[in-house]
Image (cartoon, rainbow, N blue to C red):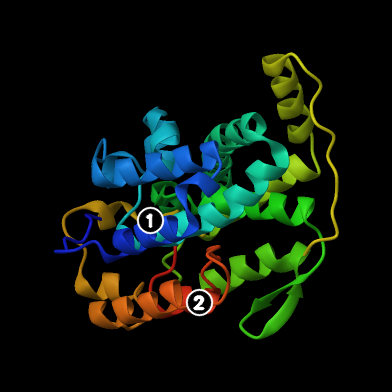
């Protein structure tokens, strides 16, 4: 799918407004660098989306493993970028301050690659178990798989509290599963497997050996003991089949992700929620309802 060409990247402008309101000095270095990388590659993509998305067919069968590196940091359009980066700004700031920049940088680097491998593995299992080769052709792009993993970490380090998922108060430790299902129901074009891969990698860190492995790596790099983990009582890949990357997307395909709003309505709604929200300059994650009304983050 080609990026939809528009005169003004409204989502990008709103993202800059969010960053300005938050304050560059308040964003930890690794989070800021990750934001900058995603924005830079959106404005100056290394390749067309068709050549950076990750799938079983392209990544494994054709051996194009550079897609593991490229796919998390490219986005389909400005709204896709906006939702993912606002979520990163919120999650990244909390986690980097909690874990330290060295460990957080290693988490971003490892998660972005490992999620792609888990995605390929799960799609391969689906293709074989359901005897449906189309699963091997489903191509994913975007940072929201990593964001689902970071959500698992955030709920681990800041336990307690509830998330409001369409009026239902769900304990934070289950919120990522509820959002996984809700996003897929509201926008079937998003990658359920891509988001699930992020959750599984997050669990591999919080309940598996990955935390120890990365902690030892940080200890080796810093020649110091890894910081002890403490708990405090404190409370998205857009999936596309192969044919969808060929040529321009149809208006119907694009409208499926806009929640039925035209561009002017999306702009008005985004401005109201981005610039008039309660709080003291700290951005919040877009809610599922907000995402549904505009365009769901993809992968």
**Looking at the rendered structure, which numbered label has been put on residue 107?**
none
- Foreground residue among 4 and 186: 4
The residue tagged 1 is 81
Residue drawn at x 76%, y 34% is 211
Residue 196 appears at what percent x and percent y?
60, 55
Quadrant housing residue 18: bottom left
Q: Secondary structure at mark 2?
A: loop
Label 2 crowd (10 A; few <14 / some 14-19 / many >=20): few
Residue drawn at x 44%, y 61% is 21
Whichever of labels 1 and 2 marks the residue nearer the N terminus, that label is 1
Residue 177 appears at what percent x and percent y?
68, 65
Above or below residue 93? Residue 116 is above
The residue tagged 2 is 277
- In this rendering, does residue 296 appear at all? yes
Residue 254 appears at what percent x and percent y?
28, 70
Q: Secondary structure at mark 1?
A: helix
Considering the image in quadrants, where does the N terminus appear?
Answer: bottom left
Residue drawn at x 24%, y 40% is 44
Residue 85 appears at what percent x and percent y?
45, 54
Above or below residue 60? Residue 245 is below
Residue drawn at x 28%, y 39% is 51
């Amino acid at each position: 799918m080609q990026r939809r060409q528009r005169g003004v990247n409204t989502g990008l402008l709103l993202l800059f407004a969010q960053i300005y309101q938050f304050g560059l000095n308040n964003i930890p270095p690794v989070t800021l660098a990750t934001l900058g990388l995603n924005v830079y590659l959106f404005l100056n993509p290394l390749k067309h989306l068709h050549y950076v998305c990750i799938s079983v067919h392209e990544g494994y069968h054709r051996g194009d493993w550079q897609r593991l590196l490229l796919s998390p940091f490219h986005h389909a359009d400005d709204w896709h970028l906006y939702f993912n980066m606002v979520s990163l700004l919120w999650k990244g700031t909390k986690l980097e301050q909690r874990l330290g920049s060295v460990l957080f940088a290693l988490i971003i680097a490892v998660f972005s690659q490992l999620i792609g491998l888990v995605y390929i593995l799960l799609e391969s299992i689906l293709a074989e178990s359901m005897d449906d080769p189309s699963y091997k052709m489903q191509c994913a792009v975007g940072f929201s798989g990593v964001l689902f993993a970071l959500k698992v970490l955030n709920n681990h380090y800041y336990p307690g509290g509830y998330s409001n998922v369409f009026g239902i108060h769900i304990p934070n430790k289950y919120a990522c599963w509820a959002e996984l299902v809700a996003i897929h129901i509201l926008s079937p074009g998003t990658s359920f497997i891509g988001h699930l891969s992020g959750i599984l990698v997050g669990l591999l860190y919080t309940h598996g050996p990955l935390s120890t492995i990365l902690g030892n790596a940080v200890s080796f790099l810093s020649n110091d003991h890894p910081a002890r983990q403490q708990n405090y009582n404190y409370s998205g890949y857009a999936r596309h089949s192969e044919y969808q990357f060929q040529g321009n997307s149809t208006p119907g395909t694009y409208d499926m992700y806009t929640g039925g709003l035209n561009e002017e309505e999306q702009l008005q709604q985004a401005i109201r929620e981005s610039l008039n929200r309660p709080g003291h300059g700290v951005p919040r994650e877009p809610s599922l309802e907000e995402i549904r009304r505009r365009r769901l983050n993809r992968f």
